[in-house]
Image (cartoon, rainbow, N blue to C red):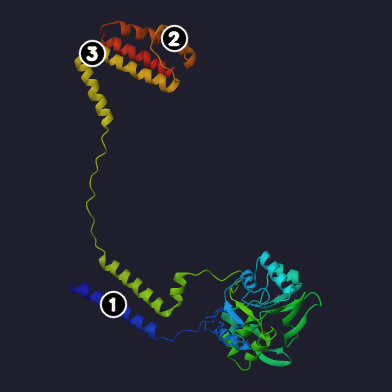
Amino acid sequence: MKNNFKYKLILFTTIGLYLLFELTKPKPTDWTLSLAPNDKIPFGTYVFHQLLPDLFTEGNLTIGEESIYQAYLNDSTQNLIILGKEFNPQTNEIEQLLRSINAGTNCLLITDELNFELRDTLQLQLDYRFFVEQQILQRRDTTQVVFDGKKYDFPDAFISSTIEPEDKNFTKLASNRLGDLIFIEKKIGKGRLLWCSVPMLVTNYSLLSGDNIEIMESIVNQLPDQKTTLTSLYLNGRTMAPPNRMRFILTTPALKWAWFIAFGALVIFMLFGLKREQRQIPTISPPNNSTIEFAETVGQLYLKNGNHKNVAQKRLLYLKEYFKNKYFMRVTFEESEIERVINKTGKDASIVKALYQSIARVNSAPNITKEQLIQFNQTIEDFYLN
């Protein structure tokens, strides 16, 4: 008993020290490029979503997760802002977007990649560089981005793609120091499509550094101050990831620790609840075949009484049922029906005639011997098998 207490004390002390270490250690910075509106990590967009309403007249901005169809269904003349790592709409959504822009609306895309179908339709190409989150802080080289003639210092590694229009039907709004386009305007019918290919410009890291908040203002102020919807539905491409209870628990610190503690307590309970015991395996007798026992009992009864004709008559009853179920015919075992039985069953004529002759002998005799019963049964079996 004392030994068990010692092991338990060591186990609980180890777990307690581990929990204390986890609770007190500095929380590492999460450098994931999420762009999520509620993320306060460097590459979230919490600051952007907090500052954006100040750039519009009160009541003109709506922030949500509406699709292109839902947004234009609510107001077909409003501005639309789409933020995400890449914009990968379906064909019918592209058609709806271009139809609305052609009618006079304005759409602002803040995404570093468009799908091929939309780029091909707009005659735009990308020069894309992969964004590696683990290496982003190791690169200290900076560039300058030019907005409205003013230059802003910006990490060069944050610019993962630049725009390369295939025609001259566009307006340059911003570029890097090398002249590569990162923000353009393209007129489509009566409306405008604005595309900024560097979503890193509106992350928390960027907006809280120097005068970079002016970059956000320059981007958004390209839209007229009217009814506008900012949608995060296309944040990770086609749509945002569906809600997941487990993901919510693991991303909320209090719930995450509650989950780990509950799971750890369950594991400890299972470990101490185990016992090296095994119940005796019971011997299970095979089920008895009562049908066979009944048949043996009835057979012994008839043999004991010596009433062999009665057994033969029982066999005739089963034979009648056989004709009824297999050949769908009723028989009386009269000689007049022999031809009909031959035609119906397809049996050899000699076998059918031998069967009927044997039946006639049994029916005419007051009693039969054991040997006659065996012969009669063999005649019936020959009919079954041939």
Identify which amino acid the numbered label 1 is placed on: Phe
Residue designated by label 3: 307
Q: Nearer the viewer, residue 320 or 351?
A: 320
Q: Position of residue 191 (x, y in %)?
A: 74, 77
Q: State left or right for residue 219 relative to residue 263.
A: right
- Residue at 24% over, 43% down: 284
- Mark 2 crowdedness (10 Å alpha carbons): few <14, some 14-19, many ≥20: some
Q: Is residue 212 visible?
A: no
- In the rendered view, tell whether residue 189 sits above or below residue 291: below
SS at mark 1 in the image: helix
Q: Nearer the viewer, residue 177 or 175?
A: 175
- In the rendered view, tell whether residue 243 sits above or below residue 321: below
SS at mark 3 in the image: loop
Q: Viewer-nearest of labels 3 and 1?
A: 3
Mark 1–mark 2 contact, CB under 8 Å?
Answer: no
Q: Nearer the viewer, residue 292 or 68?
A: 68
Q: Is residue 251 visible?
A: yes
**Residue 338, which numbered label?**
2
Gap between marks 1 and 2, in whole Å? 93 Å
Quarter holding residue 188? bottom right
Identify which amino acid the numbered label 2 is placed on: Ile
Residue designated by label 1: 12
Identify which amino acid the numbered label 3 is placed on: Asn
Q: Position of residue 170 (x, y in %)?
A: 78, 79
